């Protein structure tokens, strides 16, 4: 019951303040048809077991105004103690997103999209949720987002099903963005992001609530991201707790 209260509190924050794509969260707003985005979001995650550096190469394609597909090829460098060090390929992933609702008004829009991520067991069994588990997983969720000239909000609810492992995860994410510059042409933005990630690990009976503070510079077709993520609440089995994560990212659309 306590965990459900935390999730409801996250949802209630959505009446607050984003421009530009969130850093650690997602949003249903897609760019024009036949556009590609090449991006990376490096995560340096320090845990109670050690440190892992996750470096993904991601290619996203928008074949139509309401569909998106992507392929992620990640690499992970890790130092998790004696005999647990290395540099290897992590779990590759296929992403699909379909925008099924859209309502536009002057200077604002609200949209919703169904999202699925199929994680392939190409990585090493490092027991690092979201980085490298060496086990197949299927994620199924819904992303919603409201965006105006003054602010934007994105929220996501989904479940990551891992039939061959024990990292099944019910997730709620919330991204709130505040632009610091007035709208201008050509496009130039400086945005602050306030992002929350809530994870309930159903098979391990663990819960985690993380908060990320980020800043983003967005130009005509490129963005640069920087964020620091810290734990608010961690009630996890031994070895799963995160001390902090640092995110460094860039996106280029063509």
Image: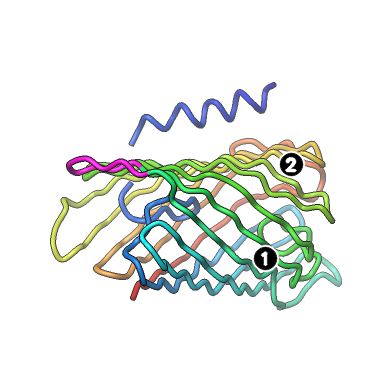
Q: Magenta part of the protein: which range?
A: 102-110
The mark found on residue 52 in the picture is 1
**Quarter in which the C terminus is drawn:** bottom left
Is residue 4 depicted above or below 90 in this figure?
Answer: above
- Between 175 and 160, the residue placed more toward the observer is 160
Horizontally, residue 20 falls left or right of residue 182, namely right
Q: Is residue 51 above or below residue 102?
A: below
Which of the 4 quarters of the picture holds residue 78?
bottom right
In the displayed structure, would residue 82 be above or below residue 113?
A: below
Report how many numbered discs are placed on residues in the image: 2
**Is the residue marked by circle 2 packed among few (<14), some (14-19), or many (20+) residues within 10 Å?**
many
**Residue at the image point whose x is 78% and y is 66% from the top:** 134
Q: Is tag 2's residue or tag 1's residue first in the polypeptide sequence?
A: 1
Query: Seen from this angle, which residue lies furthest left?
Result: 185
How dense is the environment of label 1, judged by Cα within 10 Å: few (below 14), some, or many (20 and up)?
many
- Local secondary structure at mark 1: strand
Is 157 left, or right, of 153 in this rendering? right
Residue 132 placed where, x, y %?
Answer: 72, 64
Q: Which residue is mark 2?
A: 201
């Amino acid at each position: 019951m306590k965990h459900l209260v935390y999730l409801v509190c996250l949802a209630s924050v959505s009446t607050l303040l984003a421009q530009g794509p969130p850093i650690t969260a997602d949003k249903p707003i897609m760019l024009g048809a036949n556009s590609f985005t090449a991006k990376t979001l490096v995560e340096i995650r320090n845990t109670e077991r050690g440190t892992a550096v996750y470096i993904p190469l991601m290619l996203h394609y928008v074949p139509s105004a309401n569909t998106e597909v992507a392929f992620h090829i990640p690499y992970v460098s890790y130092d998790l103690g004696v005999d647990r060090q290395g540099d290897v390929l992590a779990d590759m992933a296929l992403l699909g997103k379909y925008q099924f609702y859209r309502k536009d008004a002057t200077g604002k829009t609200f949209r919703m999209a169904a999202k699925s991520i199929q994680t392939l067991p190409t990585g090493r069994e490092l027991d690092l949720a979201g980085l490298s588990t060496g086990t197949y997983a299927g994620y199924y969720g819904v992303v919603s987002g409201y965006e105006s000239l003054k602010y934007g909000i994105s929220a996501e609810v989904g479940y990551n099903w891992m039939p061959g492992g024990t990292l099944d995860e019910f997730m709620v994410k919330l991204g709130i963005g505040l632009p610091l510059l007035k709208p201008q042409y050509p496009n130039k933005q400086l945005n602050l992001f306030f992002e929350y990630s809530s994870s309930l690990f159903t098979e391990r009976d663990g819960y985690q609530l993380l908060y990320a503070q980020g800043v983003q510079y967005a130009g005509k077709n490129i963005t640069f991201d920087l964020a620091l993520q810290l734990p608010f609440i961690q009630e996890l089995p031994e070895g799963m707790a995160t001390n902090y994560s640092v995110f460094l990212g860039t996106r280029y659309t063509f």
